Image: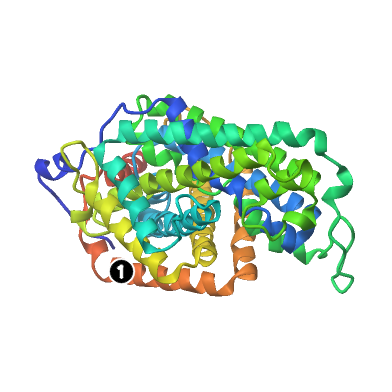
């Protein structure tokens, strides 16, 4: 059984975020920013795993999973608006162990993803030959220092900068879409030669049925990290109304871009042409429109904004997740102290240092992304399960927003999330086992120490304590 410790009023005073900093528009922008780099690169490797048909099926299924999850998160975040996000929901549904396991999986996702993205940024800068800069640790250090520094100034300022960068990336996607529409040919979608040694191989599924599962991980890249919007709950103006609206609008925008990019990039240039490219959109534009086209050049440079937007916003996400877990005592409490600007500066800097070292030492962005995806899919299973449990366990809980379809919706998402976890093992066993190793170390810390020193007054723990008291009162 967990044990709680009471803390003084000063403890929580030193751990306050700045409320009222974000309305639903900024929250929607945050959701898009988390994900938008996945539209520029990464998804196309799914063409090499499953062909266009396999990636299409995988993207539809993963899009459905994320849509179901977003509706569930919109409900839970409006009912429990704290910076813990998924940890808060799982904590109330499944107790401290459920909260810890969910929060840690999310933290692994968000702490590792920026390290991967900064490696991609380095490669992008080098390929563009900007002032002769080469990829490597000085460049990674520059980007971490710059964007962690912006976050340290204040959440309002950081979200506005992020929104501007994201707007530029969105503009690049719009230019790409408009430029590629006249070049679309359906025959280009299925131009990968079928591998007849694979079961079910065809023009539509050139790598057979197994290719669909292999493409799951890359279908996820169109949506990965949108679930981080609820982490901004304590800094939203009206979280009960703004949180559902912000995350649902973000998901709608991401679904639209996923459909357009998946259709027009291979439809204009050919699936085979872009399936192994680190920079598929400029390559697609150059192939369809000719070398040096305005569309190709603009998307090439603005694509850097997409990577920066995701890098910048996920730094925000890891700091809030670590802040919430630390404030409640699941991780060392010193990590949740906030500055005079109400910014969790330690929770911003420490994972930034770790991420920088990972990037500088390994320079293996692809492997780190797979680790982040595995952490993400594990958290999806637990968050969707939390929604189902809370609907049955606490039907009377005030829910300003209710998920369309209720537990049927979250059950569909849960089945697809379990399939996604299996797919990560299928694609990269090593990444999955590395993630499980980190998970095990964190679990040992919780089992042996922190579960005996939880903070009773932390908002997430108070939510759970209130629910337990109400349940005991109703049963007496």
Percent position of residue 277, x then y? 67, 58
User: Secondary structure beneath disc 1?
Assistant: helix
From the viewer's perspective, tell me whether residue 307 is left or right of residue 90.
right
* Image position of 190 with respect to 21: above or below: below
Is 160 situated left or right of 337 in this image?
A: right
Q: Is residue 391 left or right of residue 43?
A: left
The answer to which image quadrant residue 104 occupies is bottom left
Location of residue 472 with respect to 442 vertically, above or below: above
Do we see residue 226 in this rendering?
Answer: no
Question: Label 1 neighbourhood size at 10 Å, few (<14), some (14-19), many (20+)?
Answer: some
- Relative to 332, say whether 327 is above or below: above
Q: Position of residue 467 (x, y in %)?
A: 34, 41
Q: In this view, does 102 lie above or below 465?
A: below
Count of marks placed on residues: 1
- Asked whether residue 292 is in view, the answer is yes
Residue 203 location (% of width, % of height):
89, 57
For this view, does 118 lie left or right of residue 44? left
Query: Mark 1 highlights which residue?
Result: 447
- Who is closer to the viewer here, 293 or 121? 293
Question: What quarter of the picture does the N terminus occupy?
Answer: bottom left
> Residue 106, how many percent across, how many down?
43, 54
Dividing the picture into quadrants, the one containing residue 276 is bottom right
Q: Residue at the spot x=26%, y=71% of the render?
A: 448
Q: What colouring does the structure picture have? A: rainbow
Placement of the C terminus among the 4 image quadrants: top left
Q: Which residue appears at 72% of the width and 46% of the height?
A: 291
31 or 170: which is nearer to us?
A: 170
Nearest the viewer among 246 and 94 is: 246
| Residue 438 or residue 280, whichever sits in front | 280
Q: Which residue lies furthest to the front in this view?
A: 131
Residue in the picture at 48% in, 55% down = 117
- What residue is drawn where x is 48% and y is 32%? 29
């Amino acid at each position: 059984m967990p044990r709680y410790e009471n803390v003084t009023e000063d403890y929580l005073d030193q751990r306050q975020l700045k409320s009222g900093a974000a309305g639903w528009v900024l929250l929607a922008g945050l959701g898009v920013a988390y994900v938008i780099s996945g539209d520029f690169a990464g998804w196309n490797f799914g063409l090499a795993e499953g062909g266009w048909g396999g990636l299409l099926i995988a993207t539809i299924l993963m899009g459905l999973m994320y849509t179901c999850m977003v509706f569930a998160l919109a409900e839970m975040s409006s009912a429990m608006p704290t910076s813990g996000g998924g940890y808060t929901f799982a904590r109330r549904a499944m107790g401290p162990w459920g909260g810890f396991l969910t929060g840690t999986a999310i933290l692994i996702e968000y702490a590792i993803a920026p390290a991967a993205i900064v490696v991609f940024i380095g490669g992008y800068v080098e390929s563009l030959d900007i002032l002769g800069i080469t990829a490597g640790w000085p460049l990674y250090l520059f980007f971490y220092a710059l964007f962690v520094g912006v976050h340290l100034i204040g959440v309002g300022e950081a979200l506005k900068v992020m929104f501007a960068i994201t707007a530029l990336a969105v503009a690049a996607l719009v230019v790409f879409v408009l430029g590629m529409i006249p070049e679309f040919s359906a025959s280009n979608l299925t131009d990968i030669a079928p591998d007849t040694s694979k079961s079910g191989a065809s023009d539509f599924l050139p790598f057979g049925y197994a290719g669909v599962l292999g493409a799951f991980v890359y279908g996820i890249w169109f949506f990965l990290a949108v679930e981080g919007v609820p982490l901004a709950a304590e800094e939203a103006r009206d979280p009960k109304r703004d949180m559902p609206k912000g995350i649902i609008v973000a998901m709608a925008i991401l679904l639209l871009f996923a459909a357009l990019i998946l259709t027009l990039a291979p439809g204009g240039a050919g699936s085979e042409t872009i399936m192994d490219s680190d920079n598929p959109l400029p390559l697609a534009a150059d192939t369809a429109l000719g070398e040096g086209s305005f569309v190709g050049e603009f998307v090439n440079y603005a694509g850097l904004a997409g990577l920066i937007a995701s890098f910048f916003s996920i730094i925000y996400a890891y700091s809030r997740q670590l802040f919430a877990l630390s404030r409640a005592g699941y991780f060392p409490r010193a990590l949740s102290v906030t500055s005079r600007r109400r910014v969790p500066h330690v929770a911003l800097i420490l994972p930034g240092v770790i991420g920088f070292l990972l990037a500088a030492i390994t320079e293996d962005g692809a492997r780190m992304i797979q680790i982040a995806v595995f952490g993400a899919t594990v958290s999806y299973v637990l968050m969707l399960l939390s929604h189902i449990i809370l609907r049955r366990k606490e039907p009377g809980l005030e829910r300003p927003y209710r998920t369309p379809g209720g537990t049927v919706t979250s059950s569909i998402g849960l089945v697809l999330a379990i399939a996604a976890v299996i797919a990560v093992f299928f694609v990269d066993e090593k990444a999955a086992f590395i993630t499980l190793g980190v998970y095990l170390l964190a679990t040992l810390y919780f089992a042996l120490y922190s579960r005996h020193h939880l903070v009773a007054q932390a908002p997430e723990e108070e939510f759970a304590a209130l629910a337990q008291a109400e349940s005991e009162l109703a049963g007496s």
